[in-house]
Image (cartoon, rainbow, N blue to C red):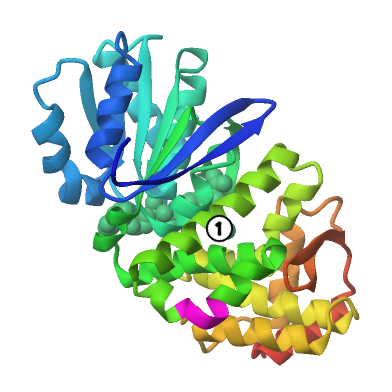
Amino acid sequence: MKDSHIETIRVSTKNGKYGIVVGRGILDAAFEEVLSTYKEHKIAIITDSNVEKIYGNQINRKLVNNPRIFILSFKAGEESKNRKVKEQLEDRLFSLGCSRDTVIVAFGGGVTGDLSGFVAATYMRGVPFIQIPTTLLSQVDSSIGGKVGVDHPTGKNLIGAFYPPEKVYIDIDLLNTLPREELINGIAEIIKASIIKDKTLFEYLEKNIEKVINLEDKFIENAIISSLKVKAKVVELDEKESGLRKILNFGHTIGHAIELLSDFKIPHGRAVGIGMVVETLISEKIDLLNSKDKDRILKLIDKSELLVSPFKFSPDEIIKKTILDKKSRKGVVEYSLVKGIGDAVYGINVEDKIIKESLLEAGFE
Ligand SMILES: NC(=O)c1ccc[n+]([C@@H]2O[C@H](COP(=O)([O-])OP(=O)(O)OC[C@H]3O[C@@H](n4cnc5c(N)ncnc54)[C@H](O)[C@@H]3O)[C@@H](O)[C@H]2O)c1
Ligand SMILES: [Zn+2]
């Protein structure tokens, strides 16, 4: 991929080796590359109704007359990330005559990626899978690492698999059509990556967070590439989350509880934003983090427009929800916390009293 290509990041794990191509205006070239790499295959592009509305024509113009290519779309939104929609997509694939010689391309945000990846993982016992993420959150986080799956009424992401993609194409220009609300949502994971493993990125964000949010040229590029590298490194060292990968959960223990309590009205990124505030306060209260670093973290999160108030849940109901989370073991919740900027630890048990104090300090009552 020529001019518009910025960088390729390689990920290598036990389950797969793949490249993440980052560029601008690379969408057409990405589809062309998929077509030429999989010459004998049918190509099933799975997308959601919003993305189809915006980019469907562009794809169609290029590919419509090619009998090997199919576009399958589902209704946009987290509500579609379930077994029913997975089944409908599988039925469509069979009716189109897709067999083992099929490549599945996820073209959309994290919902599309998780859902289509899970279809790819089980269809005919697994067919090649390509990610073309279109939201900031999916570009920096969900499209890499191989976690795919669907939700269940009991909880989020409870049914799924580890199924790494063959390749990921990140076209930063696709973010130009993304609503600001969705952009802010993705910023949370960029800030998280910096706090847990990249002090240089943290300092860059301290200076340039507004420019990143406004999608200014090299600022958004640098932020995406640096966070991708954090995730890629962590996943390479611990693909199946038996240890180190847990640091990616910083902000997520409290964040998930808030997401669930709000019935997903508070989106993931914003919930993680609040979660990072609370978990930073916890880190300081148990003497893991000094107060200067704590202040810097809180200030950056504040500048990021992530926080929404008022917080209407009580500390007790939040603590109760964290215990029900799938990541707690035998009712004991393990927190991933910060020791310093760019340095996280995992597997920490925290007394309820400290969690409650931190929630109160963050504004819950
Ligand atoms: N697999 C993982 O490791 C992992 C990690 C983090 C999050 N996730 C999952 O990701 C999901 C959230 O992802 P998301 O925030 O991308 O949500 P999403 O896929 O629902 O996308 C958000 C919204 O943006 C729209 N959209 C997407 N691209 C667009 C574009 N370029 N222009 C305009 N609109 C566009 C979508 O239609 C949707 O309405 C959750 O289900 C979460 O569990 C997975
Ligand atoms: Zn997250």
- Looking at the image, residue 62 sits to the left or right of residue 98; the answer is left
298 and 348: which is toward the camera: 298
- Looking at the image, residue 23 sits to the left or right of residue 209; the answer is left
Q: What is the x, y in percent for residue 210?
A: 42, 80
Q: Is mark 1 within 8 Å of ligand 2?
A: no
| Residue type, numbered disc 1 | Ser
Q: What is the x, y in percent for residue 195?
A: 67, 69
Which region of the structure is painted magenta? 205-209
277 and 298: which is toward the camera: 298
Q: What is the x, y in percent for residue 308?
A: 49, 83
For the N terminus, the image quarter is: top left
For the C terminus, the image quarter is: bottom right
Which residue sits at x=13%, y=32%? Answer: 62
Give the answer, above or below, for where 365 lies relative to 330.
below
Which residue sits at x=71%, y=50%? Answer: 326
Taking the image as drawn, is residue 80 in sight?
yes
- Is residue 207 a member of the stretch shown in magenta? yes
Which element is circle 1 on? helix
The answer to which quarter of the image holds residue 213 is bottom left
Taking the image as drawn, is residue 155 in sight?
no
- Is residue 249 a member of the stretch shown in magenta? no
- Looking at the image, residue 146 sits to the left or right of residue 112; the answer is right
Give the answer, above or below, for where 83 lies relative to 255.
above
Circle 1 crowding by C-alpha within 10 Å: few under 14, some 14–19, many from 20: some
- Residue pointed to by mark 1: 226
